[in-house]
Image: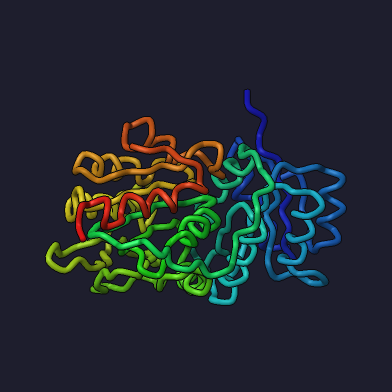
Amino acid sequence: MTLPARVLVVDDSPTMRGLITAVLNSDPEVKVIGQAGDAMQARAAIKELNPDVVTLDIEMPNMNGLEFLDKIMRLRPMPVIMVSTMTHRGAEATLAALEIGAFDCVGKPMPGEARPFGDLAEKVKAAARAQRRQAPAPAVAMIAPAADFRVGRKIVAIGSSTGGVEALIAVLQKFPQNCPPTVITQHMPPTFTKSFAERLNRICAPVVQEATDGARLEIGRIYLAPGGDRHLQVVNASAPSCRLIERDPVNGHRPSVDVLFDSVAELAGRNAVGVILTGMGRDGAAGLLKMRHAGARTIGQNEKTCVVYGMPRVAHELGAVEHQLPLGSIGDEILKLTAARKEGSE
């Protein structure tokens, strides 16, 4: 029998600590072994209890969550899930936390929300299972366009979830300014995607933006599906563009990678490249298989470099992945598959 994931809950609000504890303890595979109201209490509890996972509030007295996370990752690396208020400021702080080394993030619930903290227990279990490693910090320098890169006619579609922030930075910083039109669905709560797109835009050579309904797909632009109540699709073969549709969650997610991949398979066929990166569950696996059957080239992140080898594993087992590669090679492979010279054009 697998031992339950042992969790320390850190939040300055007694009410929030109680709610998080109740949500986690409702899952038989998770056990809250302690609570802390500030960084000093958390430090002592970590030493005494040696938890598998810590849930950490960003806004705390004495030392905020970002400062404490930085100390944890330098002195005692361990899986940490950030808990943040769903505001633009909270989104910026959480994305900074993810870059420091947080495992994942969740938003604090709104009053009356039916399922407070959503899949927090699943994230905790994935964090407990994952083998944390000391990955190099993502580079922040702009990448100059490759001198010999000539973009072809292909569309790139990327799906990611847990661990996807770091993975997407690693992939997109390989892209030159004249990259192929690229659409991305990353599982992320509302308000977080706008901040993430802005950050990617600052550190990548192409233009990165949150997708809007009707936005035309253009060379040198990357479109990130907004978190919230709509899915991202690509439509209109004569002038490919983004469409945001209201539909029930697919595979428990909205936006869903499968919805994006299905639309790209139907619209672009062999004139597309599909990429599935680190993440829990199976979202995107069936859609990537549909893309491959339609003639698209497909790439999956390998197990060794995934934070969670879930989505890429299912895609690989289904036969959806043509090339399984380490994270550091995926950006280069995308450019090889989308360069004009690979299509025989001038």
Q: Mark yes or no: residue 252 visible.
A: yes
Tell me if residue 295 comes above or below residue 62 in the rendering: above
**Up-down: is 316 above or below 120?**
above
Is residue 254 found left or right of 54 in the rendered image? left
Q: Residue at x 75, y 69 (%)?
A: 64
Q: How many labels does the image show?
A: 0
Judging from the image, the colouring scheme is rainbow
Closer-to-camera residue (340/56):
340
Q: Which of 185 and 91 is in front in this view?
A: 185
Residue 184 location, quadrant: bottom left
Residue at the top extreme?
1
- Please determine whether, in this image, residue 267 is positioned above or below residue 299: below
Q: Where is residue 340 in the image (x, y as percent from the top left)?
A: 26, 57
Task: Determine the residue positioned at 25% across, 59% down.
Answer: 152
Position of 290 compared to 46: left or right?
Answer: left
Residue at 44 percent of width and 48 percent of height: 330
Instruction: Find residue 101 and report its horizontal and vertical position in percent.
Output: 66, 56
Corner quadrant of residue 236? bottom left
User: Horizontal and vertical percent for residue 54?
Assistant: 70, 51
Q: In which quarter of the image is the C terminus?
A: bottom left
Place of residue 98 in the rendered image (x, y in percent of width and height, measured from the top left): 61, 60
Residue 227 is at least partly visible in this image: no
Foreground pick, 115 / 220: 220
**Residue drawn at point x = 50 percent, y = 42 percent:** 326
The quadrant the N terminus occupies is top right
